[in-house]
Amino acid sequence: MSGQEAGPSTWAELPWQLFQGWRRRLREARSPSTRRVCLRGGTPFDHCSPTMRRRLSMQLPYLREHNQIRTTKYNVLTFLPKNIFEQFHRVAYIYFLFILILNQVPALAVFGRYISLAPLLSVLVVSAVKDAYEDICRWRQDRTINGKECKVLVERHGRLCEQAIEWQAVRVGDLLVVKQDEQLPADMILIDTDAADGICYVDTVNLDGESNLKPRHALTCTQARTCQTKEQDGLYYKLDWPEGEITFEAPNREIYKFEGFLQLGGGAARHIGAIADTAPAKARRERKPGASPEHVHLTSDTSDHEKLEEALSRRQDGDVEGSEALPGNVRRGLTTENLLLRGCTLRNTGWVIGVVAYAGDSTKVQLNATGIHAKRSKLEKLMNKEMLILALIGLALCVIGTIGADLWIRAKHVERVPYFGAEESNYDGASSEALISFFGFIILFQIIVPISLYISMELVRGCQAYFMSRDIEMYDSKTDIPMTVKSLNINEDLGQVQYVFSDKTGTLTENEMVFRILSVGGIDFRLEEAVSNGKGVNPEHAGDTGSSLPRDGVGQECESLASVSERLCDKTGSQAPNMDPIAQDLHEALLTMSVCNTVITSPASASGMSHYQGESPDEVALVCAAKAAGYALRGRTSDVVEVQCVQGKVLRFQLLALNPFSSDRKRMSVLLRCLHTGTISLLVKGAETAILPFAERKEVAEASLQRLSNSGLRTLCLASRTIDGKSAEEWLTRYHAASSELDNREMRMAAVAAELEEKDLRAIGVTAIEDRLQEKVPETIVALRKAGIHVWMLTGDKLETAEAVAYACGLFDESTVVSRVRGETREEVQLVLRTILDRLTVTEDSNLHLGSSAQNQKTAQPGRLDTEHGILIDGQALALALEGEGRSLLAAVGHMCSSVVCCRVSPIQKAEVVVLMRDKVGALALAIGDGANDVSMIQKAEIGIGLSGKEGRRAVLASDFAIGRFHFLSRLLLVHGHWCYYRLGTMVLYNFYKNAVFVFQLFWFTFYNGFSTQSAIDQLNLLLFSLAFTSVPTIMYGIFEQDVSARTLSTIPQLYAQGREGLVYRRPKFVWLMLDTLWQSIVSFFVPLGIYRPDGTLWVFGVLLMASATFLANVHLSLEVSYWHPLIAASTVGSLVFYILFQVIYTNVTAVEVYAVFGRALSEARFWLGLVLTIVMGLLPRSCGLMYNMLVHPTDVQIAREMEIINDAKSMRGRMRTWDSRTCSIPLEEEELQETCVIHERD
């Protein structure tokens, strides 16, 4: 609940959360920390007796784990109790349930027993039907997925063949065969593929949305050891695999992390079919779907590491005979490269065989399926407080009525109160009768808390979400992605955003990396045509034209990258002494660009050109640039990389180790052995902070980095190191030992990698890549700043690069006073922040002094660009600032700056910055990003927005709203956010008002009925006032009202201050509303009382009371309407017509006590006189107040709306204007509006 206010709903959920936590801890305690399966399929426990297996299944739950998934919340038995339990998380429902129970007591009954059930039951039934429909849809989807077919290897007549089973019948340990373009039914460890190198390619678009193919590697000891034979009755397999056992970690949510090891322990390799004759083990027989499999596990105690390496090398060279005898007791580590995840699709690979590791709900994709994240809006939190105040007001009315009843009974000296029951009822004394009256008043005044408001808000939010998702101006035609609403509870928060935290790459930029420069030895090598994708040259990005970043500062000495062949001709692949240093560094730099990555080469197309695919656009751009320079990556296997150099020479390298990039390490390296010369080299690329501190000859590289980053380019530092064979062998021993560990494997491998990467490096060059800004990004950010929103850019780029991008995208401009925060220690950073804070405080005081006069109001107005400040803070300083006292200083400085740029930020630091500003400042924060590294930031913010970009859909899956382009954020906040907040804020206040007026009418009547619970309005009308007679116009208002048009809101971003400052719904407005409610209740009661008191009857008087409340509420809402959408007008008139028709039918057909009273009341002139007087007198103060504020103290929105009307009147000369149902199509000229509409300063 960090940053979230603990409301009543949270308290109600506490028992359920404690129960779920207890179940989770019990399940974790019973679950083993590791799992074990056999290399040939099955588990080590399959040969046990049935009795022993049953005992083991209790200790090892994965032995009975099935692959059936269930995303439904309910079943037939649990739907009713569970759904009711969930709905009563709302304290208001418990309140109404308490009142309903009270009303069932005969002595306390105010309403009929059955009629009193209607309000609560109607709300519960509507919500239950909605939940049931959603759950049925989920059940149908589950049934479709569980019923899909897959192939499992079974033994038939002593031979292995495929058998089709349903996904839900898959078990842990099964050997599955997956064909090309098929989805993986479970998480499985890859054993073999149809490729000789054991590589397959998977499409993870269903998992994380990334379209790039990912390579996965089979286990080294089983590559190319599967023989497939096609016969008339099907395919048969012979598996020449060694015996072994795979141990791996228990299920977890880490998609990009997998730890395990393979323990070889067999003698001669034999296929499963031959094992059927080996006693006492049982081979797996053909089974029915869902039956438990039977497998074999054989072990051996032989161990010989060198013989294993020799056998594997012979197998790679095609010596199948030599692979028949593999030594045992050899341990090899497993990583994510060996794991295929459920939901992925097999591509560019004929078939794969794998052993199931996780099934069903234990798969990583199911563990990460969290569904829609429920949040509570800021408006709803305030609304709950006001509801508590209303409940206290209702309680005060009950207390007053109770005291009055006691005094009245004592004053009349009666022994029996006639209206409490029959004549023979016992009189229990004044105090007892008053106590009974107290509970009766609670029932009578219950509607002061509007239960129908919850249903109304859900309907309104759902319709708002529908219209937002259908907005054509937020539809990305290039990617065919519309705007999506994933969280329906926080629509109105879009209109109250105070801080926007944005990622840079892929969010503000296109994430299309365009290679620009390779700087080696101070010489910049450029491509004549910019390279950005796997096709080599992107014609759209040729040259430097169209670049969104400045080109100043680029080195003067420049050569074409295509001319490197002249320098490197006949010298590639050698360490010739006649090779000049520049040529040597250039050769190693291009080689690093080619092989220090995980890029794969896809098959050649019809044109004969191969394409590159990689997990990062940066890697692909570097590989394509190296290819354009003559260093083309031809292909890679699990242990060999080939590069074609200048003049067609092919260099082959043995890949000894690959240390991947991570946000903590900020670098990547490969250890290669050249198969031509035997030289072992370490090639490294990464951020300068992770390389240059450990490198020699770094002065030139530092100068190049400074020059290129000042131009706004993304820079990477390249380095190399030559290693002798003995050191490499010793390091590889430690590397393989760390890779086979189950505990803290990543940390241990990173420590081992640092032994090579942080010693004796030689800086060889710097690369510069440009990531172009998305269209309309500068305009969007400027509009957000004008709206008074603080914009923060959190990026992993170098400070100079981030600064250039900040100026290019509009975060900073010429008038922005930019301060830089740097420091090596915590004290230095805090001193810098304190100095900046002192300067900003003095500036703010000066601006406030200037703004005290009317002439300088515009100078002191927040959101003006001429007095804005911004700060730049690098990663090291940010890490230090997030500690101790620096947190408060950073929050204070950030709050006083309109724009902030944080550089070299890790994903966890992004989340920490959001939490800091959310908690310290108490501001409503919005986070927007497109990649997996933005998920934590998105989840920590009150509003998370995912961008459907090129880094997949993990950010979208974790978000509350999803858009296709960054510039849609402007319309989402400034237009839809403004509307949603204004509509719902006004709607909530109106519901409080109309119910309070009605309750105060009933309260005033108690002074004239002996302080009893007798009402002048019959029971059914008491219940239908809020549910039927006044609810529909409110809902239509919440869906279609527009205080100003979309064009005006986009043109004048300053209007967003209405929501950002919370001007629509705030405590002073609630207080004035209650005072107005008190006045209207007095008028609507005492005017009818004065008319009917001389000779009127109770029920005729009640007709005027009910009509006054109904007409007064609907006319009151009409005063709030700015845009008369046809449905708003129809619902307002229709509600009044429905009220009249209902009364005519009800009082003349079904009613007993009030039979024909409605017609009799309408036939009298004094009824109509009283109705008109009530409406006029009741609304007169409010009408005068609205008129006074509009003429004397107009708000920005009122001024803008007035200008729309003036501009519209001009456009109507000689023609009729039509209204658009989606937006008010007023022909508003931007220049005229900006000149005429003056934004006033508000207190």
Image (tube, helix red, strand yellow):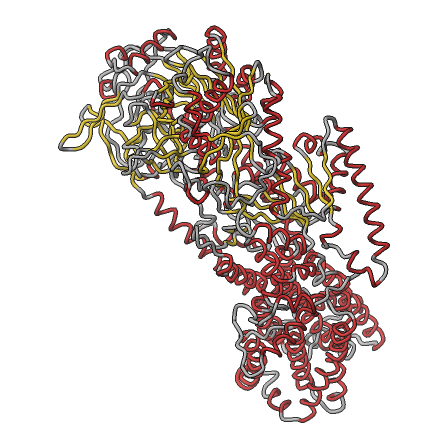
Residue 85 vertical placement versus 621 (above, below): below
Name the residue rendered at 30%, 27% in the picture: 193
Percent across and percent down for residue 815 are 72, 49
Q: Name the quadrant containing residue 2.
A: top right
Residue 443 in sight in this render: no
Q: Nearer the viewer, residue 256 or 573?
A: 573
Q: Nearer the viewer, residue 492 or 209?
A: 209
Count of picture labels: 0
Q: Name the quadrant containing residue 838.
A: top right
Percent across and percent down for residue 748 are 54, 19
Percent across and percent down for residue 637 are 36, 23
Percent across and percent down for residue 1058 are 69, 61
Residue 369 in sight in this render: yes
Q: Nearer the viewer, residue 867 or 1099?
A: 867
Q: Name the quadrant containing residue 536.
A: top left
Residue 1081 vertical placement versus 817 (above, below): below
Name the residue rendered at 75%, 55% in the picture: 862
Judge from the rendering whether residue 382 lies leftward or rightward of residue 466; answer left or right: right
Q: Quadrant of the C terminus?
A: bottom right
Name the residue rendered at 57%, 58% in the picture: 971
Outermost left residue: 232
Q: Quadrant of the N terminus?
A: top right
